Amino acid sequence: MLAHAGLLDGRKATTHWRYLERLRTRFPAIDIDSSSLYVDDGGIVTSAGSAAGLDMLLHLVRLDFGADIANRVAQRLVIAAHRGGDQRNWSCGRCPMRPPT
């Protein structure tokens, strides 16, 4: 929706690895980061899928409320308190759906 609205033009963004090429083809004005879990480009934050969306959520909570609150949210969700946004957005080394390296 953000891409269709033109809100990502000229910005850095990411999406699920499965849709990267489709996004790249349909919206060439977007600076696509294919190796991140989430991208924060000054006011617009995109994630690379559902699980990465949780990482993005914690990033936003950390920005707005601090690390202590973000850590408490992560503890309640039983997820890692912080996975940097610059990690690869897929991790299955043997997955047949894995994108080419």
Image (cartoon, grey):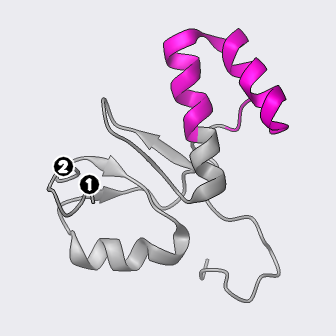
Identify the residue at image location x=55%, y=39%: 56
| SS label for mark 1 | loop
Apparent side of residue 60 relative to residue 10 in the rendered image (left or right): right
Q: Which mark is residue 7?
A: 2
Apparent side of residue 95 relative to residue 64 in the rendered image (left or right): right
Q: Which mark is residue 21?
A: none
Identify the residue at image location x=54%, y=57%: 35
The answer to whether residue 69 is magenta is yes
**Quadrant occupied by the N terminus:** bottom left
Examine the residues drawn in magenta and state their main secondary structure.
Answer: helix
Whether 95 is drawn above or below 9: the answer is below
Q: Is residue 80 visible?
A: no
Q: Is there a contact, CB below 8 Å, between mark 2 and mark 1?
A: yes
Picture coordinates of residue 42, whole percent (x, y): 31, 30
| SS label for mark 2 | loop
The answer to whether residue 77 is magenta is yes
Q: Give the spatial CA distance, label 2 vs label 1.
A: 5 Å
The residue labelled by disc 1 is 2
Q: Residues within 10 Å of mark 2 (few under 14, many from 20)?
A: few
Residue range corresponding to the magenta coloring: 56-83
Identify the residue at image location x=24%, y=60%: 3
Picture coordinates of residue 93, whole percent (x, y): 80, 74
Whether 92 is drawn above or below 46: the answer is below
Whether 33 is drawn above or below 59: the answer is below
Looking at the picture, which amino acid does disc 1 mark?
Leu
Q: Is residue 23 visible?
A: yes
